[in-house]
C-alpha cells in the first residue's frame, strides 16, 4: 500500500512541475549596453572665445527584440563610422539625438570609430582624438 501512496505523490509533483514549466513565460533578454573603451576627446573654442576640453564615452545598445539594430548615443554632434565585420556592411551615423540614434548595422560583430566634426554649431574644434569600440549585434 505504501508503494502506491509514494507513486501517487510523485505523479502529483511531476504533474505540477510540468504545468509550471508550460505556463512559464519565455525569458526576455534585457538590452545590452557596450561602452566604447576609447572615448572621443577634444579641445575646442566656443562662441565666447574661451577654450574648453572634454571627452565622451559613447554607448552601443543592442536588444534581441530588435535584431540587426544598434542604438548609438547618448551624445550629439558626433560621427560614428561603423563596419559590420561579419557581413561587410558599413556606414556613417551622425548622432543628432540626445536619447540615441538607431542604426541598422545588421547582425554580427561591429567595429566603430567616433569622431567630432571640425566645425560644429557654436564651436570650432582645435584638436580631437577619435573614440573606438567593438560590440556584437544579435
Image (cartoon, grey):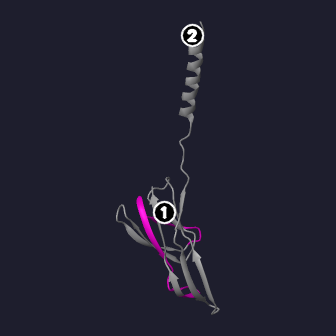
Q: Is residue 53 magenta?
A: no
What residue is pinned by disc 1? 70
Query: Residue 57's image quarter?
Result: bottom right
The residue range painted magenta reads 97-125
The answer to whether residue 5 is above or below residue 34 is above
Looking at the image, residue 112 sits to the left or right of residue 30; the answer is left
Callout 1 environment at 10 Å: few (<14), some (14 to 19), or many (20+)? Answer: many
Q: In percent of the image, x 54 and y 33: which residue is there? A: 21
Toward the bottom, the furthest residue is 49
> For residue 105: magenta?
yes
Q: How many marks?
A: 2
Residue for point 49% across, 53% down? 64
SS at circle 1: strand
* Mark 2 vs 1: CB contact within 8 A: no
Q: Is residue 74 visible?
A: yes
User: If you read the primary sequence from the N terminus, does the residue marked by circle 2 or circle 1 appear first?
Assistant: 2
Point out residue 18 in the picture as x, y percentages from the top left corner: 54, 28
Tell me where residue 54 appears, x and y as whole percent. Answer: 60, 80
Amino acid at each position: 500500500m505504501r508503494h502506491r501512496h509514494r507513486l501517487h505523490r510523485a505523479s502529483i509533483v511531476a504533474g505540477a512541475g510540468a504545468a509550471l514549466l508550460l505556463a512559464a513565460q519565455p525569458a526576455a533578454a534585457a538590452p545590452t549596453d557596450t561602452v566604447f573603451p576609447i572615448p572621443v576627446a577634444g579641445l575646442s573654442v566656443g562662441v565666447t572665445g574661451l577654450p574648453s576640453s572634454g571627452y565622451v564615452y559613447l554607448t552601443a545598445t543592442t536588444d534581441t527584440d530588435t535584431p540587426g539594430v544598434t542604438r548609438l548615443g547618448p551624445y550629439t554632434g558626433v560621427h560614428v563610422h561603423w563596419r559590420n565585420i561579419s557581413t561587410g556592411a558599413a556606414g556613417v551615423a551622425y548622432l543628432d539625438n540626445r536619447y540615441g540614434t538607431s542604426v541598422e548595422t545588421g547582425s554580427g560583430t561591429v567595429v566603430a570609430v567616433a569622431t567630432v566634426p571640425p566645425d560644429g554649431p557654436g564651436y570650432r574644434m582645435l584638436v580631437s582624438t577619435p573614440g573606438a569600440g567593438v560590440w556584437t549585434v544579435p
